[in-house]
Amino acid sequence: MIESPISLDSLRRSRGTFADSIGLPPEVYSDEQFHRFEMEAVFGAEWLCVGRQEQIPNVGDYLSVTRAGEPLIVVRSADESIRVMSAVCQHRGMCLTANTSRSDDDMLDPPDLESGSARSFRCPYHYWVYNLDGQLVGAPEMARTTGFEMSDVQLPTLAVEVWQGFIFANLDHAAAPLAPRLSKLDEALANYNVESLITVDPMTIPDVPFNWKIMVENFMEMYHNSRLHHGIHDFAPSSGAWYQDYEPGDAAMFGFNETLEPDGGFNPTFKALFPPLPGTTMQERQRVVFALVAPSLLMGFQSDSAFWFYVDPTGPTSHALSMAYIFPASTVDLPDFGETLEEAIAGVSNFNRQDMPTNVATQAGMQSRFAPRARYSWQEGVLAHFNSWLVERYEAADGT
């Protein structure tokens, strides 16, 4: 158990619905001590997205990622299963690189978010080598060390679960399974065939200068859509928002934003740029789904595609943000796919240019002596759901 530096009674005032809760204490957005507590209470105990399964389709394919401050390797192992293991050599703590058919000068330097194909993983410091399952298979000049056995050395592994094509890992091997707690979201996404969608390579922005929760809150609430994004978000006004009820035990919070016409899009034309997702209904083509698999996988589903963000805290007032689109294979195979994708990304950039400075200013405001704990609008009711989920984790970690 670890004690929260902010009283649980104060945190509990943020739990409930929009009708009876208030915002989180301002300190949770900047306090160093609370950040350390939160990293253990939330990111040390929950399922964290580390990528998509189609990014590592073949044996030896890997991703190098950092989650909760831990350098990790996500790899398709020799038996074709997906493993997530520490990228830290168990000798002197150097981060591993990938043994490939390339020259030493061209090897991966974890923990950057990169991908490739490896025969094994090697420490560039003393050349200890681990196979795709994380077992030590090479350790030069260790024969004189009494009692040393390579078979005793294994890279620490994380619990792994794949849901809808997304790969999740958990530092806590005793954590409850994720998928059963996502049944409501599964039902909402049944026609989107998410597992079969294909991701483009994620883009990562390091050290975004505001707390990770501000990013989650901005992505999920629809109150600001018709205000901050007036003009460019008019095809999906805030008045068309509604959220799925949240219950303790749910692992996702999500909602819907109705569009004025079918096949709307986040670009200057307000129209979808790609063919509609196969299998979706006309009702689904006239709304956007915004979802959070807590703590920090954010997803948006529109009529022609979906997009996913991963938010990884790097400090109390910063985070790394990775983002990518996912599409049906039929869309990726279109001859003009690359050009159209650039148009779609440019369209979303219009929203980012408004959201980013707003979130930076919110971070500054939350560090003010006059920072509020305000009531919520029904159009941001999902924030009360998110707060409720967080407070459950804070309580469980504190145990008092």
Image (tube, rainbow, N blue to C red):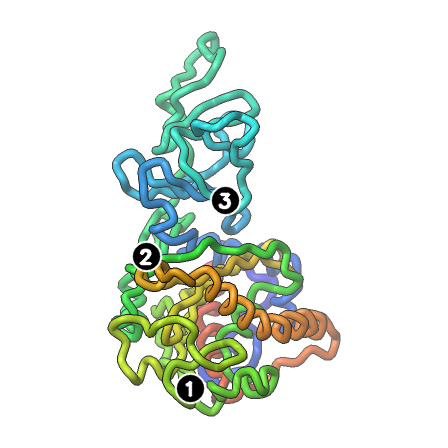
Tag 2, which secondary structure?
Answer: loop
The amino acid type of the residue labelled 3 equals Glu
The answer to the question of whether label 1 and label 3 lie on touching residues, with beta carbons closer than 8 A, is no
Q: What residue occupies the far top of the structure in this picture?
A: 144
Q: Check residue 353 in the rendering and tell me which mark sits there, or answer none.
A: none
Q: Position of residue 199 (x, y in %)?
A: 40, 57
Which x, y percent locates residue 130? 41, 27
Image: 23 above or below 240:
above
| Amino acid at dot 1 | Thr
Counting every numbered tag in the picture gives 3
Q: CA distance from mark 1 to mark 2?
A: 27 Å
Nearest the camera: 57 or 238? Answer: 57
* Label 3 CA crowd tier, 10 Å (few <14, some 14–19, many 20+): some
Foreground residue, 276 or 210? 276
Residue 329, position in %: x, y? Answer: 31, 59
Residue with the mark numbered 1:
259
Q: Is residue 142 above or below residue 264?
A: above
- Which secondary structure, mark 1? loop
Residue type, label 2? Gly
Report how far apart the C-alphas of labels 1 and 3 lie in the structure: 36 Å
The residue tagged 2 is 165
| Disc 3 target residue | 114
As drawn, the residue found furthest toward the front would be 335
- What's the CA distance linking mark 2 and mark 3? 19 Å
Residue at 57% x, 63% y is: 212
Q: Nearer the viewer, mark 1 or mark 2?
A: 1
